[in-house]
Amino acid sequence: MSKPIVAIVGRPNVGKSTLFNALAGEKISIVKDTPGVTRDRIYAEVTWLDKTFTMIDTGGIEPESNDVILSQMREQAQIAIDTADVIIFMTDVRQGLVDADSKVADMLRRSKKPVVLVVNKVDSFQKFMMDTYEFYNLGIGEPVPISAASMLGLGDMLEKVVEHFDDDAQNDEEDEIPKIAVVGKPNVGKSSLINKILGEDRVIVSNIAGTTRDAIDTKVTYQGKEYTFIDTAGLRRKNKIKEELERYSIIRTVTAVERADVVVMMIDATEGVTEQDAKIAGIAHDRGKGVVIAVNKWDAIEKNDKTIYKFTNKVRETLSYMPYAEIMFISAHTGQRIPNLFETIDMVLENQTLRIQTGVLNEIITEATALQQPPSDKGKRLKIFYTTQVSVKPPTFVIFVNDKELMHFSYVRYLENKIREAFGFKGTSLKFIIRERK
Ligand code: GDP
Ligand code: GDP
């Protein structure tokens, strides 16, 4: 199920990053060893009570002068309007209400998106409470006083945020048609690929507008099967937003990946695989999505009999955290291997929802532990009682053990490999939860 997206918008120095860090805490990324992604702090998963959402910080630009602040805020607000389910609009009680706040508030009000107005730096409710009332003038509802730095009022704020989550809308999206996000750095060939697919094999095209975040999804029928390609929200606004701003392409990627079942990660064959690619692919990996790596522009490079082998090794090395992903060499221009791309997408979709019976699963685990003894520490050996698959998308397993501390990361890897040897699961990450049973 796709998680709601919450964006923070506000002038520089009101405290957006402080709030972001306070909420994200250690949960900034599920997988700690995904390169790049963890350092960025552009987005994070937040859990509050029983709700989980993805938070994005649209800020982070250092404006050179006051003149550009407003235009940059407008741009930020537009991104939030395009991508978020709920917007947190942050103001600063110490600076008071300023003109730029009113202009952005107007914009947010017109968008009809749910907005939670927060007034930050209310470090003492006694001292500053009176000053928060002027923010009613923005006309976007009741101001919620918080102090991001001292973590005051955050519960009240989050309560207002989650109130706006539309549980029904999330379920509506759970239709049967698989959702595919095509991601990759600018100029890798995302639009070309989608255009090629649209132009081929008598595909039927329709734009479905009006989903919760006004994304324009494209429905494609390929060889009798339907797919929804998620617009990486921005293909259509290419000229408006400065493409070179990496932050914005990451935000677009996160929001598209969040809604996708399978992510097609494109790499430019003419440039080779880069750190930026690793960052983008890491977003899909962190979210537990199905992944197909498509090395594009294969028509444009000189090849010999070792080229594929060498390229594959490079990709495996750079994207070492996703050895499960299939690598394909395609050309959006010539259409080379696009049929295989669809076959692979279908396979990954199946694997994302594959369920293994507990009996069969435990046979494999028992065999594996007999082949290689579980780790021990100070005379105490790890004992695995039993393993069960608790969910799909991604396939998630709970391993019941005598002592969690004894379970090494490398032994989980070993068990994962054994499960993959037996059942495949190509194209999808697997998640393991270790539980103690006394
Ligand atoms: P951003 O530009 O909106 O991301 O703002 P920052 O999060 O970088 O914060 C700007 C400044 O405000 C920093 O010096 C913070 O320490 C400070 N700040 C943030 N939250 C609070 C708060 O709740 N109270 C006070 N007094 N200062 C804060
Ligand atoms: P996007 O920014 O990821 O959407 O990339 P585009 O689809 O706009 O493509 C960027 C550039 O790469 C354009 O000049 C395309 O013509 C070119 N391009 C895309 N796919 C291929 C391909 O398969 N082969 C070659 N040779 N060029 C390609």
Image (spheres, grey):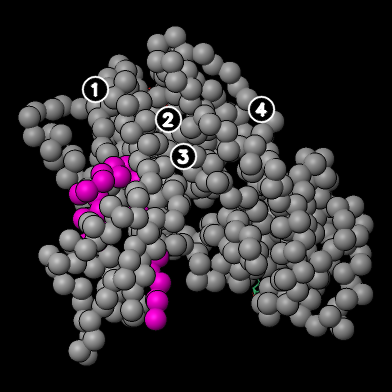
Q: The residue under label 4 is which amino acid type?
A: Ala
Is residue 297 covered in magenta?
no
For mark 1, does the 10 Å Cα neighbourhood hold few (<14), some (14 to 19), or many (20 or more) residues? some
Between marks 4 and 2, how big is the CA–CA gap?
20 Å
First in residue order: circle 1 vs circle 4: 4
For mark 2, give the secondary structure.
Answer: helix
- Tell me where the magenta segment starts and ends, as one range: 414-438
| Residue at which label 2 appears | 190
Q: Position of residue 419 (x, y in %)?
A: 25, 53
Q: Secondary structure at mark 1?
A: helix
Q: Position of residue 125 (x, y in %)?
A: 84, 80
Q: First in sequence: mark 3 or mark 4?
A: 4
Residue at mark 3 to residue at mark 4: CA–CA distance: 19 Å
Give the CA separation, mark 3 to mark 1.
Answer: 28 Å
Q: Nearer the viewer, mark 3 or mark 4?
A: 3
Q: Which residue is mark 3?
A: 261
Q: Which mark is residue 209?
A: 4
The amino acid beneath tag 3 is: Asp
Q: Position of residue 159 (x, y in %)?
A: 75, 64
Q: Earlier in the sequence, mark 1 or mark 2?
A: 2
Foreground mark, 4 or 2, reads: 4
Instruction: Give the label on residue 299, or none.
Output: 1
Residue type of the residue flagged with mark 1? Asp
